[in-house]
Image: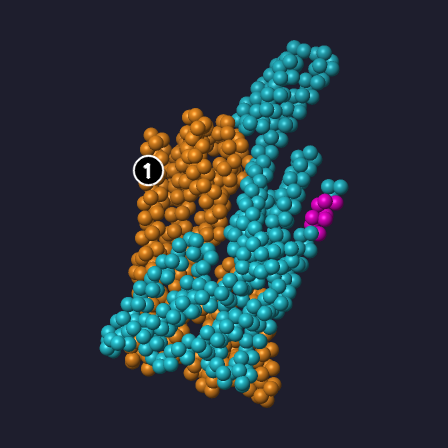
Chain colours: A cyan, B orange
Amino acid sequence: QSKLFFLSNVRYFIDKHHEQHAKKVIHSIKVGTALVLVSLIYLLDPLFEQVGENAMWAIMTVVVVYDFYAGATLSKGLLRGIGTISGGGLGCLAAILSEDFGKTGNTIVVGTSVFIFGALATYCRMIPSIKKKYDYGFLIFILTFSLVAVSGLRADKISELARERLTTIGMGFAICIITSFLIFPMWAGEELHHSTSSKFNKLACCIEECMEAYFSDSEKEGRQSINMSSCKSILHSKSSDESLANFARWEPWHGSFGFYYPWEKYLQIGELLRELASIILLQQVIKEKFNNVGISLGLTMHELGESIMKMRRGQEKVLMLPGLQSIELELSILSTSELQAIENVEALPIANFL
Amino acid sequence: QSKLFFLSNVRYFIDKHHEQHAKKVIHSIKVGTALVLVSLIYLLDPLFEQVGENAMWAIMTVVVVYDFYAGATLSKGLLRGIGTISGGGLGCLAAILSEDFGKTGNTIVVGTSVFIFGALATYCRMIPSIKKKYDYGFLIFILTFSLVAVSGLRADKISELARERLTTIGMGFAICIITSFLIFPMWAGEELHHSTSSKFNKLACCIEECMEAYFSDSEKEGRQSINMSSCKSILHSKSSDESLANFARWEPWHGSFGFYYPWEKYLQIGELLRELASIILLQQVIKEKFNNVGISLGLTMHELGESIMKMRRGQEKVLMLPGLQSIELELSILSTSELQAIENVEALPIANFL
């Protein structure tokens, strides 16, 4: 029955592997499709005449914004939009304000504003809470601000340029969203849901196999190391969980996940599972020692049983006592509240025997 | 004396905090300076006449490539260069090959090639080993390939465009490298070095405070939870360690770190320290009898951290040897395969110190 558990488990992992691979292939095809669609802006004459060379920005948007998860694509796209608009607006302002100064004054004003806004936004990017969620938006802000403020001195029709560039970025974003949400969407929320539930399964298998290994002979070391790697993978899942939850918050209603779905609860559960995983890993560490204690305890018990059966006493005492003392020593070194309990319980009957 | 330890520790963290803040400010100023320098390409007439509107690419390069660590900036810049050249070359080829076909055939050939290369490179980006190190290069490859292949149909002088664009990217990259390496360089390797040695100190403090809490009354629950947070931060340091080591490999000779410095050894030590941290976190489960090991382990960890920080060797011989032996003895009592490994790895550098 335990064998069956193990087999179904292996099969689950193989299926999971195939599924992961299929998802990657689908994502690649989606990106390819989005690229072809966005290329059409360049390739089809009527569209190209509308936007001209700015069509470049649509391609750039698709390449940079498209992410594996729908929520990530949406959040990146929105951040890019916000960053572009705020950076472009401020950049225009800087360019216009600097117009009143002479040629040299102009250069100095623009240079100073680029320095100040660039340094400020860079500092903001390093604040942990911003870094986690809005890093990309600030990056785009710096980029757009610098480009607009600096080229504002050259381009006469800056507002037209801004309009065209925003339109193409919007087109690129629309293509991203359509292909990402309509063709086999990959939801970060679903992934978080599945990974959390599979963590429970992995831990359950670990515990089961630990038990099995404990009760059976100690020859199956190879299989034990497999458990440990899956246990360790849980231990290091914090950052991926956090980014998944971060993306999941951007995702609209889908499947069984409504709006305002409590994604942070998954993070709390994940935290507890990681603690459990580390306990299991440590238990494995202690187990080995416990086994040794167990073996000698077992031997002593055998001897005690035999001597009681044969109503022998005296001659065993010499053999017994050092063995028992060494067990006591080892238990006291290991002793945890649990092991202490074991010791006490076992010490009582043994004390009675002697 | 333990109080003193604690105070010096608090002070260390405050200093560390100030240092971190100062570093962030310096980085912001460096980025601002680089932006101003790159803006000069736009702002100064003789430079602008050379490159024209392509000056945009220099700004983009600075904004996107500039990273906190010198090694990260260098690796991103090089990856960007390689991605641009390979993507541009292949894109040119696709554009030239598609010229022989008619207007519609042309569009189909370019569309197909964009789809195939885009999808293939996207798939490559999801292979874990590539994702870890070369993700950015593949992103730039997709971007450049699409842009060049698609606009090749429009631009007549594609080679001139490519030359100008590469020149400006090179200029941007040069500005990044100069400001990053010459003005207060932040080495990822140094950061990895310091964070590893501070991990030893944190663990030592954890162990010491646990002991203190154990010997005193059990009322100081608050302080215990502080330890645990620093212990937990070690537990979740895997990904940041890996990226630091990744960047450190790109960094040239600096300080005491030569070429081919064995950065992966830091990762191995980090892995073992994380295991130790998880064991310490579980000390609440194994409260009793931890102290004997704890006192000497704490001291030795402090010493190890300090000697790694200062790259000292030799004079520690007298202090280290008896302490180490007693730990070895006690660890061997607790010994597990994992702890054995810690012992071995630590024995190696210590063997060098002695």
Determine whether, in the image, residue A2 is placed left or right of residue B73. right
Q: Is residue B260 above or below residue B38?
A: above
- Is A331 a magenta residue? no
Residue nearest the viewer, comparing A34 with B5:
A34
Camera sees residue B8: yes
Residue A4: x, y in percent?
74, 45
Q: Is residue A88 left or right of residue A255?
A: left
Secondary structure beneath dot 1 equals helix
Q: Quadrant of residue A3?
A: top right
**What span is colored magenta in the figure?**
A4-11
Residue B214, quarter of picture: top left
- Determine the residue positioned at 62% across, 15% down: A351
Name the residue: 39% across, 44% down.
B197
Q: Is residue A244 visible?
A: no
Identify the residue under disc 1. Answer: B8
Residue at (46%, 74%) from the top-left corner? A166
Left or right position of B184 against B283: left
B171 vs B290: above or below: below
